[in-house]
Image (spheres, grey):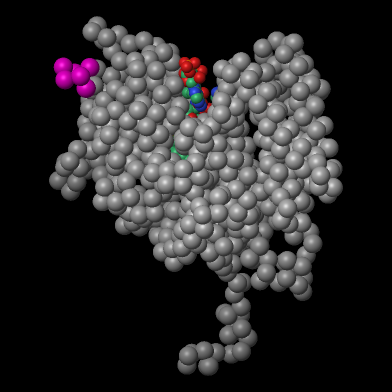
Amino acid sequence: VLEDLEMPVARRETENLFQERPETGNQYLEDALLRSYLKAHLPPKVLEEVSQDLERFGNRLLTEVKPLGWECELNPPVFRQYDAWGQRVDHIITCSAWKRMKEISAEEGLIAEAYERRYSNWSRVHQAVKLYLFSTTSGGFNCPLAMTDGAAKVIESLGTPASLKNAFDHLTSRDPKKFWTSGQWMTERRGGSDVANGTETVARKQPDGTYRLYGFKWFTSAADSDVTLTLARIADAEGHVKQGSSGLSLFFLKVRDEDKKLNNIRVQRLKDKLGTRQMATAELWLDGAEAELISAEGRGVASISNMLNISRIHNVIGAVASMRRMISLSREYALKRVVFGKLLKDHPLHMQTIARMEVQTRGAFLLLMEIARLLGLAETNMASEQDQLLLRLLVPVAKLYTGKQASATVIEAMECFGGQGYMEDTGLPVIVRDTLVLSIWEGTTNILSLDVLRSLTKSQGQVIAVFFSTVQKKIELASSTAELEPAVKQMQAAINRLTQFIQGAGSKEAVTMELAARDFSYSLARIYAGALLIEHASRPDASAADISAARRWCNQELCPVATEFKNSSYEAEESLMDSSLVYGS
Ligand code: UCC
Ligand code: FAD
């Protein structure tokens, strides 16, 4: 105080002239779209209980979880390979805040909620919303949770065999002392997309029926996890293995034994990553790791796809959460930051910038809720065959689309803070870095576009018929709302263009669909999200913002695949030109 008084006025003013920090409150209470979605869909009794839980959780996130998340960022995991006496120890040391996140995840039932099903088909929505609120303050703990949920799902899909019952109980426990997390080890040195050709790990059967795994896993996230699922090729009596996808089987293993000793696993090093630095991603040698075969032999990929589909949904949760968080901070900042003599919020061009992000985020959020809703129906035997087909299609569509949206949105939002947005200790670059991985892991954009085609082929085209009829139903409901008329018209035109594309593409060579896969998937995402926005905006208590979001969304190019098809972009000649453009003539 004394020093303050003695300081010359000019210096005192400069030193106190800070730009104000954007402060956000309870994320649940501040999220109007989330609350209106829950109000529109949940049965009243469920809504009452879920809202209370979310409000309480929102406060816990603010007071307890957020500081822990920041601590995780400041204290990333450290790898110690040898002890002081030259003994190989391979310790991955995580901070106390990271360990606390695990306990909080159990206490909050972030996995348990989905498997207890106390709200029947709505439990998945409840869980998804809690994870969405948790995501950006979780200090990267959303990653192990994604894989843990995936592992529990695989075990449940296998009918929870007796040998895995204990693991299932741990993975879905609310008891912090009992709760386990899982890894998902699929990527090897030869590749992460092409798992069928990339997997070299061999499984040797032991006399007691268990297996020992030998191989090298190139990316293993949350390497401090308790258990994992992984793929390997079973060697026959002569030591031969079958190549390709049908040579892969799925295994469950515990990473450490009761004494915390690694299960014949050696850690080569931790990855030096652009983001998700709070979480340890390791390179691991499996040198006879004890494992249990949990799929039919040769059905590894099909069995682990249950895990993939769940962790891809978590990826969507992460994408929407990042967008929402950056927008919340941007709009708060705009209430405080003065430039050119007025607050940022009073500069129309700046408001337009944030509003555009808001429209994108709304579309992505409704896609996420739709998937959680369908998953909830499927898990409580309430889903029709059509619902199940739609879910299979929408998971890759939403993962690939929201991953890209989120990357673009967080970068745009970073700019909303000017130079401050680029400053490490604001925490904003952390969100940006952690978001950029969302389009890479859990299947890249192209790989997921091809998965969209796989879902079409597998259903012999049925899924696309369901897609069209669902979209049609949703927009028909809105026909009575005059303000939504232009949006409905644009949607109708997009549906017609997509239909024409499908008919046109059907008569061309197979290469066409492969080249069109990404644009096709984007078209499905935009059209479906458009229908959801229209549906949400046609509620009797819809706000002007709901209607505007639907209209603005539908104003964008809804069906890029039709335009590119018309431009002959998917013809063989154009494909050759792509190569020439990339490599020169
Ligand atoms: O990156 C990873 C973890 C990161 C950390 C966690 C973050 C979580 C988010 C955090 C929140 C912020 S783990 C690694 C992820 N890796 C991938 O995603 C792999 C990407 N590659 C693919 O997805 C490929 O498409 C493959 C591996 C699935 C292709 O394998 P195949 O064997 O060549 O494909 P096939 O032969 O077409 O498929 C084999 C079987 C078929 O079934 P059947 O035999 O009955 O006809 C397919 O229909 O598997 C079935 N299948 C699926 N079924 C394949 N994919 C799926 C699917 N998605 N859903 C259902
Ligand atoms: P590649 O397959 O070599 O892909 C390179 C490029 O080629 C991509 O742009 C891709 O879209 C494109 N491409 C590939 N095939 C095709 C095709 N047929 N047509 C068109 N384009 C194609 N993996 C795990 O198993 N477990 C983990 O825990 C894990 N954690 C990770 C954590 C981080 C931070 C990161 C970055 C990755 C992690 N991964 C993990 C690996 C991740 O899943 C893979 O990196 C990802 O699936 C891509 O595989 P790849 O790296 O081999 O890329």
Above or below, 13 relative to 74:
below
The residue that appears at 29% across and 28% down in the rendered structure is 161
State the image coordinates of residue 45 (x, y, percent, origin top left). Answer: 51, 54
Instruction: Name which residue lies at 76% across and 72% down.
Output: 342
Q: Position of residue 475 (x, y in %)?
A: 75, 38
Q: In which quadrant is the C terminus drawn? A: top right
- Relative vertical location of residue 564 with respect to residue 377 in this rendering, above or below: above
Magenta stretch: helix, strand or loop mostly: loop
Question: Is residue 185 something that shows in the picture?
Answer: no
Q: Nearer the viewer, residue 185 or 83?
A: 185
User: In terms of depth relative to the viewer, which is nearer, 40 or 356?
Assistant: 40
Q: Nearer the viewer, residue 15 or 426?
A: 426
| Relative side of 351 to 454, left or right | right
Range covered by the magenta-colored residues: 205-210
In the rendered image, residue 77, in percent from the top left (x then y), is placed at 35, 49
Q: Is residue 119 left or right of residue 324?
A: left
Q: Is residue 146 magenta?
A: no
Q: Is residue 511 above or below residue 100?
A: above
Q: Which quadrant of the figure has residue 232?
A: top left
